[in-house]
Amino acid sequence: MTDSRSLRPPVVLVADNQEWSLRSIESILGPEGYAVLRSFSGQQTLELARVIQPDVIIIESSMHDMTSVEICEALRIDPQVGPSIPIVVATTRLESRSERLAAHRAGAWEVWGQPLDAELLLLRLENYVRAKREIDRVREESMVDAATGLYSPRGLARRAREMGAEAVRRRGPMAAVAVAAQSPAVVPSESSDEFMGIVVDHLAEILRRCSRLSDAIGRVGQSEFAIVAPATEVDGVLRLLDRLKVAVESSPVSLGGVTRPISIRAGYCAVPNLQDSAIDVDELLVRATKALAYARTGEGAPTQVNAFSDLPVKYLQ
């Protein structure tokens, strides 16, 4: 199947508050088929990088709100950006060795001097784009979520079908559980993404500890996880969720020296005999996800856990 990204032009995000410098970059890249997007502040660079997922980021200068090194650091620790997007710092002045080292420590792939050599710039960008797209391709095909080490949605679906086939053969029970982290409302908005990244890592580790070796655990959303549990009926699901609840509530997370509690919301669907049920394991996961969605609305009873069988009719569609 053709990768849709290979059909679109390479996207370069240029962070610079100097109009003439931006036009210079555009005059080099535009004729070669690159799509050039601009940002005029450090915060805008972070926001655009999360949404657009560019192939390369070029930081032309320090901004009024952040230095080029601070922008690099913020991009690297942002879970929605990460280390796979090449970042280049281009400077109009000769950087000292210590300044270059600081940029590389912050996550810059290269530090370029000005004026830019157009031919060399294009060759470098071609290599960066090729590497970035290969990373994206491998990640999409991978069965493992790179951030947590758990199954990816693709990997979990495949493993769930294998487990479902075994459950059908044995005429055994099967359960699916969907879990999401619930972040406290007191987290400052400018720190919410960083905090959620910490929460996701923390919850992934708790899920590993509280689940059985026979269970399959996957990350299926930004802060959502799913567990496929063979040989498990409703009482087993509730015991698992009790363990998770205790573990999560007894281990708050810290951000900026401030400790904050977190909680979870969960939904589940369990059948006593998968072969005799009217659904397969894919539908089991879908129903658990719908039950989680209802638990996150806060409707109905003030519970953190919902069974699919207890959902209102409008959520059953």
Image: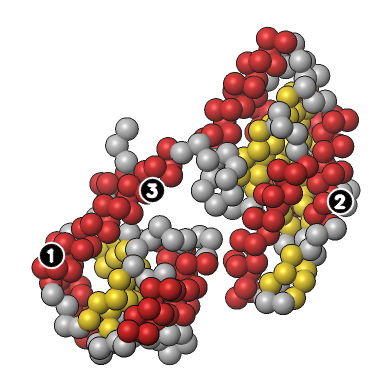
Whether residue 294 sits left or right of residue 103 in the image: it is right
Q: Are marks 1 and 3 in contact (CB under 8 Å)?
A: no
**Which sits earlier in the primary sequence, circle 1 or circle 3?**
1
Q: Residue beneath label 3, please?
A: 136
Label ID, residue 246: 2
Q: Residue beneath label 1, please?
A: 31
Residue at figure coordinates x 59%, y 66% from the top left: 193
Whether residue 122 sits left or right of residue 88 in the image: it is left
Residue 252 versus residue 279 in the image, above or below: below
**Which sits earlier in the primary sequence, circle 2 or circle 3?**
3
Residue 126 versus residue 119 in the image, above or below: above
Q: Amino acid at mark 2?
A: Val
Whether residue 289 sits left or right of residue 52 in the image: it is right
Residue depth check, mark 1 versus mark 3: number of the one nearer the observer: 3
Q: Position of residue 35 (x, y in %)?
A: 25, 63
Q: Position of residue 294 (x, y in %)?
A: 75, 45
Q: Which quadrant is home to the C terminus? A: top right
Task: Say what secondary structure mark 3 lies in.
Answer: helix
Q: Amino acid at mark 1?
A: Pro
Q: Amino acid at mark 3?
A: Asp
Residue 14 versus residue 122 in the image, above or below: below
The CA distance from mark 2 to mark 3 is: 37 Å
Q: How is the image coloured?
A: secondary structure
Check disc 1: other Cα within 10 Å, few if <14, some if 14-19, many if 20+: few
